[in-house]
Image (cartoon, grey):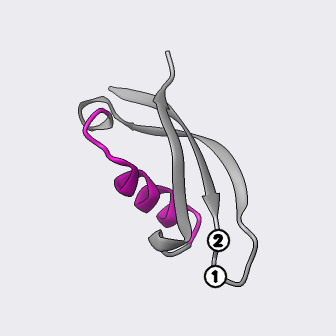
Amino acid sequence: MIARYYAAFSIQPNPTNRADEQGRIVEVDDKFGELLDYDDVAEILADNLNLKAKSVRVHHWVRLH
């Protein structure tokens, strides 16, 4: 089963760029959603946005009902 989460995060491709704040709905397997920490979520978002994980900083991660 799929669970939906809302992630509020910022993207800063390199230290000289300004950070761009965004929010997205992320769908993950229900079994693993609660086990993910912010670093895991940053990796998922970075992979989907074709960025390096260190470019993404997750501020908030919450399950949607």
At mark 2, the secondary structure is: loop
Location of residue 17 with respect to 48 vertically, above or below:
below
User: Quick check: 11 left or right of 47?
Assistant: right
Task: Name the residue furthest top.
Answer: 65
x and y percent of residue 46 in the render?
51, 64
User: In the rendered image, which residue does mark 1 sit on?
Assistant: 15
Task: Identify the magenta region.
Answer: 34-50
Query: Label 2 amino acid?
Result: Gln
x and y percent of residue 58 in the render?
51, 51
x and y percent of residue 11 in the render?
64, 64
User: Quick check: 53 left or right of 19?
Assistant: left
User: Quick check: 45 left or right of 10?
Assistant: left
User: Callout 2: 10 Å neighbours few (<14), some, many (20+)?
Assistant: some
Kindly identify the residue that appears in the image at 64 percent across and 71 percent down: 12
In this rendering, the label closer to the viewer, 2 or 1: 1
User: In the rendered image, which residue does mark 2 sit on?
Assistant: 12
Kindly identify the residue that appears in the image at 49 percent across and 75 percent down: 52
Instruction: Count numbered badges in the picture.
Output: 2
